[in-house]
Amino acid sequence: MSVTGRDFIYQNRVFWSAFPAKAYNKKVLIEEPSIPMIKHANAIFSIILNQAKSLTPVWLHNNAEDIELLKSYVPTAEFVSVPKASRFDKIKMKLAAIWKFMIMYLTKDVLSFSYDGVKYGDIVYDTYLKRCSVATIRAIDTRLLRIIYDCIYRHEIIRKILLSDDFDAVLVSHQIGIRSGVMLRTAIRYGYKGYLRAGHHLSTLRCFEKADEVYDYEYKPFPEDVDRVIAVLGPKFNDVYKLIFDKQVSGEGDKDGIYAFSKDSKCYNDRESFVREFGLDAQKKNVFVMLHAFNDHPHSHFRWMLFKDYYDWFEKTLDFAKRNSSVNWIFKQHPSIKFYITKDVSFDSLFSNCPDNIIYIDENKQINTRSLVYCADLVVTCLGSAGFELPAMGGIPSLIASDTFYTNLGFALEPKTKEEYFRILSNAQNIKPLTAKQQKRAQASYMYIYKFSRVYMPAFPIATVEDERDRNQQSWYWGKVAKLYLTSEELIKNSVRAYIDDVAKPDFKQLNSLDNYCHARKAEKWTNSFVPGIKELA
């Protein structure tokens, strides 16, 4: 169904007329419409913000065809074209970019770049990796100059728009990248609220008001959240964990989980068969090093990293492993690596001529991540999900090398220096499994990250990474939405009403399902759909 199809636009307007637009003088600036999935999600959250905060949606306009569609969600929605900078302003921004680039060239330091008091070095670094399809920055070259200019230009344009009208906030779909990330940080810099809408059929809405908060990952549990999960679930803790765990590893969980726990990947249920098939010494401990997608924004989500980037972490860890024969080293490729091409890395070359105690499991011979419960003694990741998944699943200790979304929760090994990181690795043969208390905190974190930090959005079709990246998404997505309107109308509207109530609270910070569970499951029908079995367990 075409986005400009008259039938869908009419159906969409009739459906959302159940939420009459609220008129108020305050506005929320929304990033440019992009792919249908993000367009639809941002539009529904614009309804929630309009109803909860009386904010009129103002869309950054980049396509005339979108106007009629977006007004079918909130008829009072406004549109503003991205203004073009004057020749004089462009010259000023180019000179500022050249100056910043020269400093970067002399210091060889990308991450310290800032503009107008806002830290942007992480966004510039990660944008370089993404645009150039590389794993690391090997030299300061003029491609960085263009990215610096784009960053400054976006900052100035967003600042100009926000100051031109009575805005209260912005709404973006990511914390990262020049379009969303710079927009979010610029808004906060000038005292506006930044709303981040993340996820799809499992979503959250997070409100940022301070610059440093943008490094709090949208699904991040704080220690008090972990304490609440344990306290609230009480004797039902294990039953609820099993429900959430089974959903995640069944292939119906988050998008990366579909690949990590794929039924097409071999699953080892005992240590002996694993070491035998890979020719490893059964008397040695198994250390699994879980590789990252190197250009998947290593810096923009979190505050610090012990290494230069994911590739630097991997390279130095592999060098260390080559000199350490006391354990078996298993380097496991990221399950979604096919979506993150890097032109400057040859894994075959990097793993050629390695000692017998080092193996590399590439993307073509992946093993199901559940195997690690039986085969791993230590899991090593820079900041990936394996660092809380394996502690939860099997009490396997994890070693991390950066600030991440499960830092300071009481179960991961968290060195603060490279020396400490390698000191822990050198003692890998003596590391013990987690205690029962540590594993329980990891399980509580697992439940918060995969379920309680999110809410079920029945108006969003369930989608895979392939669906997200499908260039023909326009041809099928709106048809799936229209079908949901017909089959799940009551569920969709009841859930949106419940989310409006939550966002309307004066102290609103994040939309999550834990609050609803704690407050007597006030929207029981959709909570029950969100976590099957919750009603019975309660």
Image: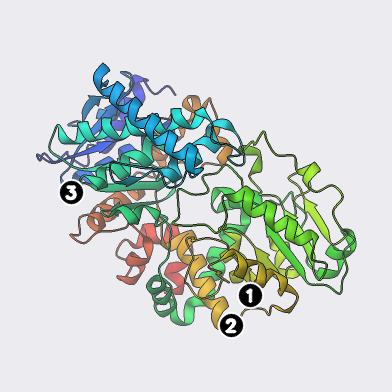
CA distance separating discs 1 and 2:
8 Å
- As helix, strand or loop, the secondary structure at mark 2 comes to helix
Tag shown at residue 332: none
Q: Earlier in the sequence, mark 3 or mark 1?
A: 3
Q: In the rendering, at what x and y percent does residue 500 appear? A: 24, 52
Q: Is residue 450 above or below residue 102?
A: below
Whether pointer 3 and pointer 1 mark residues with C-beta atoms closer than 8 Å, the reply is no
Q: Viewed as shown, does residue 83 lie left or right of 227?
A: left
Q: Nearer the viewer, residue 492 or 321?
A: 321
Q: In the rendering, at what x and y percent does residue 534 appear? A: 44, 68
Q: Can the viewer see residue 224 in this picture? A: yes
Query: Which residue matches tag 1?
Result: 395
CA distance separating discs 3 and 2:
44 Å
Query: Which residue matches tag 3?
Result: 53
**Residue at image location 42% in from the left, 68% down from the top:** 535
**Residue at image location 80% in from the left, 62% down from the top:** 323
Q: Nearer the viewer, residue 405 or 441?
A: 405
| Quarter of the figure with the N terminus | top left
Q: Earlier in the sequence, mark 1 or mark 2?
A: 1
Q: Earlier in the sequence, mark 3 or mark 2?
A: 3
Q: Is residue 366 above or below residue 470?
A: below
Three-letter residue code for mark 2: Ala
Query: Which residue matches tag 2?
Result: 436
Whether pointer 1 and pointer 2 mark residues with C-beta atoms closer than 8 Å, the reply is yes
